[in-house]
Amino acid sequence: MVKVSFQQKPYRGLMMQAWGAEVFPSPSDRTECGRKMLEKDPDCPGSLGLAISEAVEDTVKSKDTKYSLGSVLNHVCLHQTVIGEEAIKQMAMAGEEPDIIIGCIGGGSNFAGLSFPFIRGKIKDGKKYRILAVEPEVCASVTQGELKYDFGDTAEMTPLLMMHTLGHSFIPPKIHAGGLRYHGMAPMVSHAVKLGLMDAVAYPQTKVFESAVLFARTEGILAAPEPSHAITAVIDEAVKCRQEGKKKVILFNLCGHGMLDLTAYDAFLSGKMKDAGNGD
């Protein structure tokens, strides 16, 4: 488990332990790449890219272990499209069609799952959907990264991928949206950006949590930090529609609750949260 998430989200680790798992913060002293990072920076907060390196190394060295990557790769994006296919049917049941489709984006598969079936509509049927990916300002691979071949992990154990990337050695600041702290973007999502089929925007985390608290107080739902990025864009788009006097249907993916992220809400509500640096 990425060290900063291990520290910020202790109940996730406890849940895994309750089901019989051993949980170690990454970088750890249990792998070669983890030890190298700790030697270089004993206080390294870790990253998803580094945790992948440790997991792959452990898998390669263990005879009874298999590894399945849950994001970024194209086949994972394909599996996730059940989200968008269901959303299309749900919108039809509601008698509506979205004008704007919004989702948070880290490695890309969650966002691809919602948006790709609608991108199909843009390509095949000439639909005019605006598709918007939302990422953290301090780990913004799409809006700030470079489109090039790069490794999917810190220790260079994965194949090279053509993607928007901040560099596989990039260690993001300790923001509370742990699921979005990844240096690269899924190749198919990156290609969709290149083709102009979707746009991206980035927000600082204090603005994201302002939106999360507003959403909780108006909708009664405590969202996780990751989808709260999408909520922020939804609010901005809705305000823009009101100012322009336009009516638009906005679809977004609320992909996680925040009941295991209460330490993040505590940091925000107590005024301790920062936008850059250590992000606490």
Image (tube, rainbow, N blue to C red):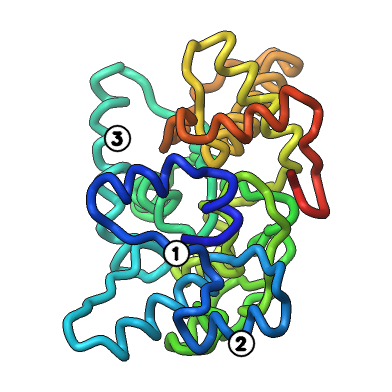
Measure the alpha-carbon separation of dots 3 and 2: 47 Å
* Corner quadrant of residue 211: top right
Disc 1 residue crowd, few under 14, some 14–19, many 20+, Cα 10 Å:
some
Evaluate if marks 1 and 3 touch, with contact meaning CB atoms under 8 Å apart.
no
Give the mark nearer the N terminus: 1 vs 3. 1
Q: Position of residue 185 (x, y in %)?
A: 54, 66
Query: In the image, what residue occupies the spot 79% across and 33% down?
Result: 272
Q: Mark 1 belongs to which amino acid?
A: Phe
Q: In the picture provided, is 16 more to the left or to the right than 51?
A: left
The vertical placement of 280 against 196, above or below, is above
Disc assigned to residue 88:
3
Disc 3 residue crowd, few under 14, some 14–19, many 20+, Cα 10 Å:
some
Evaluate if marks 2 and 1 touch, with contact meaning CB atoms under 8 Å apart.
no
Which of discs 3 and 2 lies nearer the camera? The answer is: 2
Q: Mark 3 belongs to which amino acid?
A: Ile
The vertical placement of 29 against 185, above or below, is below
Disc assigned to residue 36:
2
Q: Which residue is mark 1?
A: 24
Closest to the observer, 263 or 42: 42
Measure the alpha-carbon separation of dots 1 and 3: 40 Å
Query: In the image, what residue occupies the spot 63% across and 20% down?
Result: 213
Give the mark nearer the N terminus: 3 vs 2. 2
Query: In the image, what residue occupies the spot 49% across and 30% down?
Result: 258
The C terminus lies in quadrant: top right
Q: What SS does tag 3 mark? A: helix
Q: Mark 2 belongs to which amino acid?
A: Lys
Q: What SS does tag 1 mark? A: loop
Give the mark nearer the N terminus: 2 vs 1. 1
* Corner quadrant of residue 90: top left
Q: Is residue 97 visible?
A: yes
